[in-house]
Amino acid sequence: MKQTTAQVISEHSRDLLLNHKGLIFGQCLTAVGWVGGTIPELTEDEGLIELSMADVAGGSIAVGAALSGRRVIYVVRYQGFMWYNAASIVNYAAKSKEMWGIPCPIMVRGIGMDGSIGPVASGAHHSLVARMPGIAVAAPMSGQEWSSVFHWWMANDDPIYVSESRKSFEVIGEMSDLVINDADVVLVGIGPARISVTEAVKQLNSLGVRTSSFGLVWLRPLQLSKALLGSVRNAQLTLIVESDYESCSVAATVANRLWEIADGHVSLLGLDDRTAGFSRESDNTTPTHESIIRYILSFLDGSIATRQ
Amino acid sequence: MRPIRTRISEGCYRNQFQRQLEHDEVVAIWRQWMFNFGFELATARAVREKRIYVPTYLSFGSEHVPVSLFRVLGNYHLFAQHRAHSYFLSRGGSPESLRDELLGLSSGCTGGRGGSASIHAPDAQMWGHSGLMGDQVPIAVGYCQASGNKTLAVMGDASAEEDFVLAALGYAATKNLPILFLCEDNDFSILTPVQTRRSWNLTTVARAFGLSAFDICDDPSEIIGAAETLSNQLPALINVHIARGGWHAGAGSDGPPEWNRISMFEDEYSGVVGRETLKEIRTEEIERARRIWEQS
């Protein structure tokens, strides 16, 4: 039976603690739900360490633990809390090897949420981390992707930020790319936006709009597959869909790279440039498949300005 | 010399931990202290001559604090921040590599990247500092918890105000970790005094968290006594009152310090070691440090 992404994360975490002397730090790890079923039900003696609710200190404590040579997973309950937690992660863990030759192998699991979760906790914030040197950034959605990220981390001594989404925890099986020859439209999804992209690409193809779709897992260093680059080259439109803000973002960096090779138009669709409220009317969520389809149809009928 | 201010006479409980130092101990402390002092004199000269162009945090007035601490805490893993030259030297870091670091050379202890503020000495279990004031405290706490090693986290009275430092003190108490926090309290954040910045006292706050915590004066015998006592009561905090001997950064000063611990120590221990002996050691060590700089 295929596992959910949450089950895969939990199993790797259990293996880290029981067989590799690893540690997991976080707030409310052992609360109801065990972080969406991603945390194995172990004890502090086995390496599962409950921190106090001090977000800035907590990140720094986890960084210090990783300096000891033990592998540390640090769970950040909402990606938006990275604005508090990032201090030592990007300023110490990410710099330690370059500055002092001392690796700091910490994995930060930033868990994104969407929908009625308010101005700080909403959305993905991996672009905050990705602008700093010395730290890898990945956004796996499937169990296999998370597993490959984990194995990379275990084989290397660099810190990594794993941009997760609660929506990924229930994903079963893989989220494959869809490559259509001579596609007019290429959709590139990052994080939970890939769920919207998957639905949009189905409907667009059924409408006769030849559309390929790709998911990006490795955001820093950025990995763009040959199939993606080949598809973008000939497409009329490449749209990068993201769960983070567009401004100064990973998505903007991807778009910039793709502009260099694309004959057609390259654009972004991320969070609106405003703060998320709690009500449905004021919320600011990952683009839906409907909004993606609307954007593409508007482009194709000429109502969106294109590259000159 | 100006009289010692009320902050030390009222707040340091001078005789809580103090014990008489023996002849050999006095000599050993004085020798390393004077080397640290001589190193800083030579460093200050290099700053004035513009051979050092990075912000430089000299430890005038506190050169003896690490010397005293490491009489007791020699096996502790050390996390410090800026103004740590004397920690580096007292811990056994190579003075030539510190000199080269300050000169921005690749042969420096941190390859020229660390400057004065971000030095480290991996062979001596001294960890580097990022430059974010106070972050060494929670990092030291995490390191201590994961490694189980006895750990010394050094901060200043300004760093102690960082919210994450206070949270780290509380966490260390909660987890009952083998860590000693040492605050070098020179009463200033650059030039803003403590009483302008806060109404609370660090040791009172630390005690409220459940730490053993004391204010002490910077007499080496008091520091040693406090370290001996509190190393058996970890986690613990020592707030040692010192008189900064120069500017926050750079080689200048605004006049004599609030008190001069060097001359106080000479007066106190001349009867144990002999004033001439102390003077000879002082001359030897300052000269040794000067020669190291001369070779650069």
Image (cartoon, coloured by chain):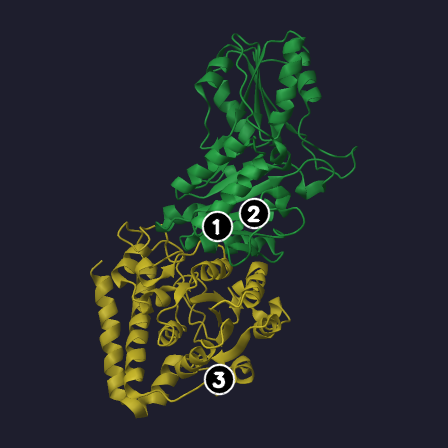
Residue B191: image location, x then y, percent: 52, 66
Residue marked by disc 3: B3
Q: Could you say whether the residue bearing mark 1 is in a helix, strand or loop?
A: helix
Residue marked by disc 2: A40
Which residue is at a point 49% across and 37% down the rendered structure image? A137
Colour of chain A, in one word, is green
Which residue is at a point 58% across and 62% down the rendered structure image? B167
Q: Chain of mark 2?
A: A
Split into 4 quadrants, where in the image is the N terminus of chain A?
top right
Q: Amino acid at mark 1?
A: Leu
Residue A112 in sight here? yes
The tag on residue B173 is none
Q: Amino acid at mark 2?
A: Pro
Neighbourhood count class around disc 2 (C-alpha, 10 Å): few under 14, some 14–19, many 20 upward:
many
- Are discs 2 and 1 less than 8 Å apart at CB? yes
Q: Amino acid at mark 3?
A: Pro
A202 shown above or below B295: above
Q: Which chain is yellow?
A: B
Q: Chain of mark 3?
A: B
Q: Could you say whether the residue bearing mark 3 is in a helix, strand or loop?
A: loop
